[in-house]
Amino acid sequence: MIEFRHVSFAYPGQSEDRLQDLNLTISDGECVLFCGRSGCGKTTVTRLVNGLIPHFFAGELTGDVIVDERYIAKLPMYQIAEKVGSVFQNPRTQFFNVDTDSEIAFGIENEGVPPDELRLKVDGAVKDLKLQKLQGRRIFSLSGGEKQKIAFASVYAMNPDIYLLDEPSSNLDVDAIEDLRKNLIRIKRQGKTILVAEHRLYYLKDLVDRIVYMEQGKVRGIYTPEQFLSIPAVQREKMGLRAMDLHSVKPLPKPAVQALPVLDIRAMALYYKKQPVISGINLRAARGEIIGVTGHNGTGKSTFLRALCGLHKGCTGACLWDGKGMDSKQRLKSSYMVMQDVNYQLFAESVEKECCFGIKNPDADIVTGTMKELGLYEYRNRHPNTLSGGQKQRTAVAVSMICRKEILIFDEPTSGLDFDGMLQVSRLLSRIARGGKIIFVVTHDYEFISAVCSRVVHFDSGTVQEDFAVNQKNLGKLQDFFILGQRRDDIEGAETGQKNYTEIGRKYAYEAKREESNWSSAQMGGKG
Amino acid sequence: MSNSPAANRKGLTVKDLVTIGIFSALLFITILVGGLFFAPNPVLTFYMPLGSALLGGPVFLLLIAKVPKRGPVMTAGILIGIIFFATGMHWAMDIGYIVMGIIADFAAGSRKYKSVRMNILAYMLFSIGCTGTYIMYFIDPASWASTMLRGGTEQAYIDTMNASAQNWVLAVILIGTLTVAAFSGWVGNKMLKKQFEKAGITA
Amino acid sequence: MRKLHFDPRTKLLLMIFTILSATLSPSLYYASGLVLLIMLFGFACGKPRYSLLGALTYTVFFALTILTRDFLYGTLQTMLIAFLGLVHKVYPCGLMAGIMIGSTKVSEFMTGMHRLHVPRKIVIPLAVMLRYLPVIREDWGFIKDAMQMRDVSPSLGGLLAHPGKTAECVYVPLMMSASKAADELSIASVTRGIENPEPRTCLIQIRFGAADALAACAFLLYFIAGMAVRGGWI
């Protein structure tokens, strides 16, 4: 049993939205969802239970958090860890080892479980969670979803009574979310207590017993799933929440794009180390279009977009702009990708400097105008790293606008965003599109696609499998892919999924492997 | 027992240790990348420490800024020594990094890891670790070459070797490394002030 | 040839013997014998291709040394002799290290460090360091892409043309990413009980076997033989 008794907490320097007087009791075996806008305090709640507050994050804490009659604030972290298992949102930074087996064993190794039992427990976790294919692999060769599964398995092997998940689906694709859901069903059947803080709600529909809605650090409502599902869509959106039943979300009507296509891709094929990745891409796009790019992991969509930006070199076929051919250099000049982790592309010490970065004679009016247009003007002197995720994204967009890029590519721009955040991104995209740009957006977010994309290009089996408009007529197709995930569990599909992961991932995994074997031969040149 | 709030804990916390590990990895890469250009070249191989010192300043200063207590620099030196040992680098370089890491930690610690000058000096000392191999060479250049000589030692060779191992080369290596490291530290400090402190990633 | 499995601690010991033998090597032929021995060890570890290639490359250096010694004169000779002297001291260690790294899993290595009672203040950062090296490579890939899109060339030429700008493009994202990783990774490890003061156990089990004893003896004897030659006893 978990009890919160008059718990209040504020991080150092936090004045707004501090957690205030939380009183809540969660009984054993219950599955509770904490939801609300970004910054509403739901992550703070999870940190109170797994002891990160007060042991890792300092701040003003009053009240008591009691788990099975023990005060969290008085237990050392490693004792809490045996009771409460935590899974976090970023699969890249959650693992401590380089191979999957050791990572699954990490928690129980810390507990000091005897070696023979370690092996049994690891094998048990692998068998229960069906991870045989991932055993004995280098973690760096895994996709994000697979990494998340290993992180989950590591906690599962510790067999805690309470599972705590902090936005676990943020960086996952549809398939991986489905696997996560299955794992949650399994632990729920085992009678575990589950606490989830999440923006994406749909996959928890049949799992949760109670839904706690928070706003500005306070609990505003506690619902049963039935009550929650009966909240009208308009009110739910006002609450800043995503849909729990995706079937009820219908594509919004989009303004028809009248312009003629300017971008014309003909018979494009892409290679990685002379191995074909994807071939036979024929695609035409007009200014103002927002094209959703979808597909399972490892279908070549990221390679395609990198090639479109001129970043991927092994490329055949033609790419025409207004009837004139564009080589990779010209494409690099006229296109811009907003990366999933936008931190990689922010270099300067303030938003304003970022907007002028690398431009010889920046036009101050354009810079100011763009910042104002994107709501960044008041932050112009802040360091980009101190901004929220959405603001960072807009800074990157501002850069692309100032550099007069014609083609914009967004890689998973809504991962980890709440409803408001997603809505902001869709408004932003619509506005840029109206400005005559062509936008490609890689996404697994059905609500987002429905809200903003005019068209979906679906990659599968190494080519563009489908290309269709987002409207009522194609609703079935869309929902099939995004909601059911249309998992192809047949051996072939599973194998390609395993081999290919994302192209970038493969590239680096390959190079890392090569690097490994060359590591020492590089030394052999003889040096001190 | 570790139930005191995170901020008040003395000694190295897990977060400190993880930070040290990550920044040591970065430091190792800067040494490798910087030295790569020099190492395989017979003419330049002796000047490798200069290249190795060039890139690490910003990483080093940020590490101290993130973990301003006894230990990070020392640990980084030990880790880099271990990894160079495991990659088969000359032993004098491995030991060099460990010893200079410890000395550098005390240097930076003498001003409680807060003084910019002391921290840059610590980086300069740290970079000297790389010169261990060459110092060994200059201590006795003849024995260095004796392995290659037919039937033990021939006086003529020893004389040539001793004559050619001009001491100014060693001076260039040492002073050059210190200068390059000072420059790298200066750049690092500028970056720290301009970027990392504003970004809120220092302790 | 059947692949033998060696304890990581044995490999570290062999590494030390290799360093000692290479440093105190009495003659060029002794050094080549050491490379031969290491090659055999590489075969036993199941790395025949790498070991053979390594030994062949060494043969080239060997020939080069003979040529330099017998046919060159003056400054060029002394310069090359100094360089080659370094090669002969480091090459066997590099070859050995390659075999060691290629045949040892990181987790095995960590178990070895643990069994050698290396303090946690070293083991934890060391594990993190080894785990973070591939991340730097991944990060560099993203940063390179990002730089190209901003018309900054991620190359040596770019660095020379615009040193300040290029340096910022590399360091800033790299440090931000490192900083974030440090936070998140420490959270992920404390919530899985890394602070437990009780002795940690290891999934990967390591133990000494006959092969370890044999290899250690071979390297030890070779080292002693070298000392004997050096001391003039043989």
Image: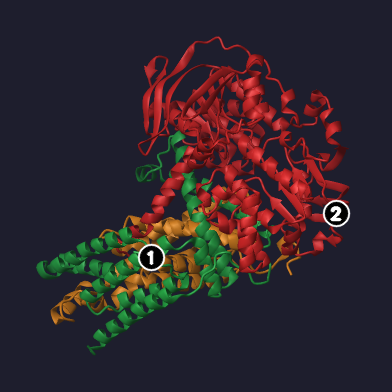
Residue A526 on image: x %, y %: 30, 64
Chain letter for red, please.
A
Residue C102 on image: x %, y %: 41, 60
Which residue corresponds to mark 1? C45
* B148 with respect to A451 (left or right): left
Q: Secondary structure at mark 1?
A: loop
Q: Secondary structure at mark 2?
A: loop
Front: mark 1 or 2: 1
A239 lies above or below B60:
above
The tag on residue A1 is 2
Quarter placement of the N terminus of chain B: bottom right
Q: In percent of the image, x 80 and y 44: which residue is there?
A: A31
Chain letter for green, please.
C
A144 lies above or below C198:
above
Q: Is residue C92 visible?
A: no
Q: Disc 1 to disc 2, how far (Cα)?
A: 53 Å
